[in-house]
Image (cartoon, rainbow, N blue to C red):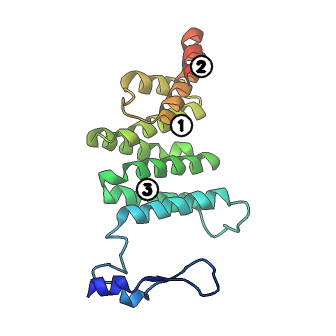
């Protein structure tokens, strides 16, 4: 039966000499093995990705839209909480991006200090899970957070007691080198700062 329904999709040539026109069977004629109403619980990665894309779109178009009733930090926090509840390895990259945009929104509102407990907790979790993508992102977010408030001692302690993951994206490594270069420049280690910044 399924093969008969597939054969219903037929290509016919128009008689006036134009290009062929495809005739597709209606949706009811599709085989019953193709699910038509997948829920977000069955596709958590798809739902999380769509939420992330909506958040990015709202951030990009914030000036053009009337978002007075919508706090983007709450939208981002909901996304981060949902991703951490799902706790799937296939969502590590989306989780890292969600945390990045959550931190960026707090930086825009000058409330970066308030999200440190979440960043600490997420960083510990990513180390325990060996989630290298999130670990690299979170180390950069913590360094950025410290440098934003000119807390160079805390940034130096974090730098000296952690090791940046070997498996990371080039963009995250470049950010890491930039933040360490800024830190070294403040500590008057100019040659080290110069080499880090030129590498970045």
Q: Secondary structure at mark 2?
A: helix
The residue drawn where x is 58% and y is 21% is 197
Q: Earlier in the sequence, mark 2 or mark 3?
A: 3
Q: What residue is pinned by disc 2?
A: 198
The answer to whether 54 appears left or right of 96 in the picture is: right
Residue 103 versus residue 67 in the image, above or below: above
Which of pointers 2 and 1 indicates the residue nearer the eye? 2
Quarter holding the C terminus?
top right
Please give the name of the residue rendered at 37% of the width and 26% of the height, measured from the top-left corner: 163
What percent of the width, then of the height, locates residue 158?
A: 42, 27
The residue at which mark 1 appears reads as 145
Q: State which quarter of the image contains the N terminus.
A: bottom left
Residue tagged by mark 3?
Answer: 80
**Looking at the image, can residue 74 be seen?**
no
The circle drawn on residue 94 is none
At 31% across and 44% down in the image, what residue appears?
A: 125
Q: Nearer the viewer, mark 2 or mark 3?
A: 2
Marks 2 and 1, how far apart in space? 22 Å
**Mark 2 residue crowding within 10 angstroms, few (<14) / some (14–19) / many (20+):** few
């Amino acid at each position: 039966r399924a093969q008969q329904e597939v054969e219903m999709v037929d290509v016919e040539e128009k008689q006036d000499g134009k290009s062929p026109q495809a005739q597709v069977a209606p949706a009811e004629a599709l085989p019953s093995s193709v699910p038509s109403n997948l829920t977000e619980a069955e596709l958590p990665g798809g739902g999380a990705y769509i939420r992330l894309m909506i958040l990015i779109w709202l951030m990009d178009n914030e000036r053009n839209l009337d978002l007075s009733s919508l706090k983007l930090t709450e939208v981002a926090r909901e996304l981060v909480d949902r991703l951490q509840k799902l706790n799937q390895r296939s969502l590590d990259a989306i989780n890292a991006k969600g945390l990045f945009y959550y931190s960026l929104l707090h930086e825009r509102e000058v409330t970066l200090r308030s999200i440190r407990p979440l960043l600490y907790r997420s960083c510990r979790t990513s180390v325990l899970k060996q989630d290298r993508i999130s670990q690299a992102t979170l180390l950069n977010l913590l360094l950025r957070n410290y440098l934003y408030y000119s807390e160079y001692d805390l940034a130096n302690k974090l730098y000296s007691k952690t090791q940046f993951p070997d498996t990371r994206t080039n963009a995250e490594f470049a950010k890491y080198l930039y933040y360490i270069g800024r830190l070294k420049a403040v500590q008057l280690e100019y040659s080290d700062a110069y080499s880090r910044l030129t590498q970045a």
